[in-house]
């Protein structure tokens, strides 16, 4: 997948693969400064399925807001 396709706005509607603990693509405002950027099996940019398995701490609250 292309990196551009995996950069998703924090406020974008939920994807079917989004949960409180993971996001499809990267929802960081600046992925370049994310401490998990490029980490195998964690970062959406290096995982084959495009899933970020360690989103920001604010994501759980944002997920509930978008789900609501």
Image (cartoon, grey):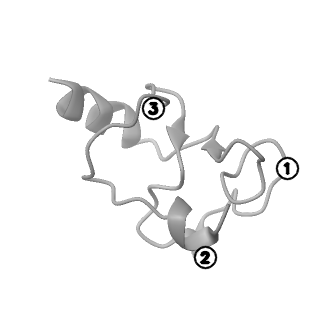
6 is higher (above) or lower (below) than 52: below
Apparent side of residue 3 relative to residue 41 in the rendered image (left or right): left
Q: Secondary structure at mark 1?
A: loop
Q: Measure how far apart labels 2 and 3 are at the Cα level.
A: 21 Å
**Foreground residue, 12 or 37?**
12
Q: Which residue is mark 1?
A: 40
> Residue drawn 70% across and 52% down?
43
Q: Which residue is mark 2?
A: 32
Q: Which residue is mark 3?
A: 18
Seen as rendered, the residue at the extreme front is 1
Residue 59 quadrant: top left
Q: Position of residue 51 (x, y in %)?
A: 63, 42
Q: Earlier in the sequence, mark 1 or mark 2?
A: 2
Say few, some or many: other residues with alpha carbon within 10 Å of mark 3 (under 14 / 14 to 19 / 20 or more): some
> Looking at the image, do the residues carrying marks 2 and 3 touch, with CB atoms under 8 Å apart?
no
Q: Secondary structure at mark 3?
A: loop
Q: Position of residue 11 (x, y in %)?
A: 25, 52
Q: Position of residue 49 (x, y in %)?
A: 70, 41
Q: Earlier in the sequence, mark 1 or mark 3?
A: 3
Q: Which mark is residue 50?
A: none
Q: Quadrant of the C terminus?
A: top left
> Residue drawn 42% across and 28% down?
16
Q: Measure how far apart labels 1 and 2 are at the Cα level.
A: 15 Å
Q: Nearer the viewer, mark 1 or mark 3?
A: 3
């Amino acid at each position: 997948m292309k990196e551009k396709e995996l950069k998703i706005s924090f406020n974008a509607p939920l994807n079917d693969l989004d949960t409180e603990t993971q996001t499809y693509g990267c929802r960081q405002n600046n992925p370049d400064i994310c401490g998990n950027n490029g980490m195998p099996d964690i970062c959406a940019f290096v995982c084959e399925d495009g899933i970020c398995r360690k989103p920001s701490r604010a994501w759980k609250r944002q997920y509930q807001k978008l789900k609501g």
